[in-house]
Image (spheres, rainbow, N blue to C red):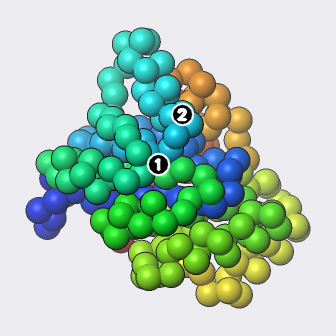
């Protein structure tokens, strides 16, 4: 159990727009937390079931797993309660989320909104923010697939800052390793120490634990 906490830290990952790397972020954080010795539970309430498929692939390859519970969004609260003895619980919400995710949001200590530095992703934040309006103090926008030295990306990041949205200090670069490791049933936190992707996800995991 995390020092000073009697229950697990619950982190929900939500986004109205599909294709922003939501499930990839859950997978990578889950492995990163597990790698630093945290008892980690992942809760899959996305009907696509990508997280469940990843865990099955991981299990078939004989790798240690973060634990997993899967069900509908309406069941999120009960699954989170079942995970009270874990250190960290990560909830993967469905894309085009609606009122069904309200139970997960209420139970969360942190709500992560993955966002690529591109106009369509930033526009889609408005719909997600509408669902999370009662939980603004829990929000963190996590910049994902950030291209190196991109003036367009810098412009989009500035737009987010001007909207006074809380942005995590650590963002994730546009690295093939994140998606590639998911397809292999692994996570970049298990990569060699000189991996930039590994450094980024571990830094993000440590940042989130500090909130």
Closer to the camera, 180 or 189? 180
Please tell me whether mark 2 sits on a helix, a strand or a loop: helix
State whether residue 51 is above or below residue 78.
above
Q: Are the two marked residues, 1 and 2, in contact with CB atoms closer than 8 angstroms?
A: yes
The answer to whether residue 21 of the structure is visible from this angle is yes
Residue at (68% x, 57% y) in the render: 17
Q: Quadrant of residue 70?
A: top left
Q: Quadrant of residue 210?
A: bottom left
Residue at (43% x, 12% y) in the render: 61
Which tag, 1 or 2, sits closer to the chain's start?
2
The answer to whether residue 34 of the structure is visible from this angle is no
- What mark, if any, has residue 92 been given in the picture? 1
Q: Which residue is mark 2?
A: 50
Residue at (37% x, 13% y) in the render: 62
Residue 122 vs residue 32: left or right? right
Image location of residue 49, percent across then percent down: 51, 34
Closer to the camera, 196 or 209? 209
Residue at (27% x, 47% y) in the render: 79
Image location of residue 203, percent across then percent down: 47, 55
């Amino acid at each position: 159990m995390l020092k000073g906490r009697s229950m697990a830290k619950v982190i929900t990952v939500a986004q109205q727009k599909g294709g922003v790397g939501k499930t990839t972020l859950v997978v990578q954080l889950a492995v990163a937390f597990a790698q630093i010795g945290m008892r980690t539970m992942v809760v899959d309430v996305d009907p696509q079931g990508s997280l469940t498929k990843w865990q099955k692939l991981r299990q078939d390859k004989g790798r240690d797993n973060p634990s997993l519970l899967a069900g509908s969004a309406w069941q999120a609260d009960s699954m989170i309660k079942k995970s009270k003895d874990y250190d960290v619980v990560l909830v993967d919400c469905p894309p085009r989320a609606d009122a069904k995710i309200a139970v997960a949001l209420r139970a969360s200590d942190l709500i992560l909104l993955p966002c690529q530095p591109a106009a369509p992703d930033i526009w889609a934040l408005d719909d997600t923010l509408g669902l999370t309006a009662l939980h603004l103090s829990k929000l963190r926008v996590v910049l994902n697939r950030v291209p190196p030295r991109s003036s367009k990306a810098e412009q989009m990041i500035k737009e987010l800052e001007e909207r006074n949205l809380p942005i995590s200090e650590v963002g994730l670069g546009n690295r093939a390793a994140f998606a590639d490791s998911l397809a292999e049933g692994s996570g970049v936190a298990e990569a060699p120490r000189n991996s930039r992707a590994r450094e980024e996800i571990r830094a993000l995991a440590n940042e989130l634990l500090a909130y």
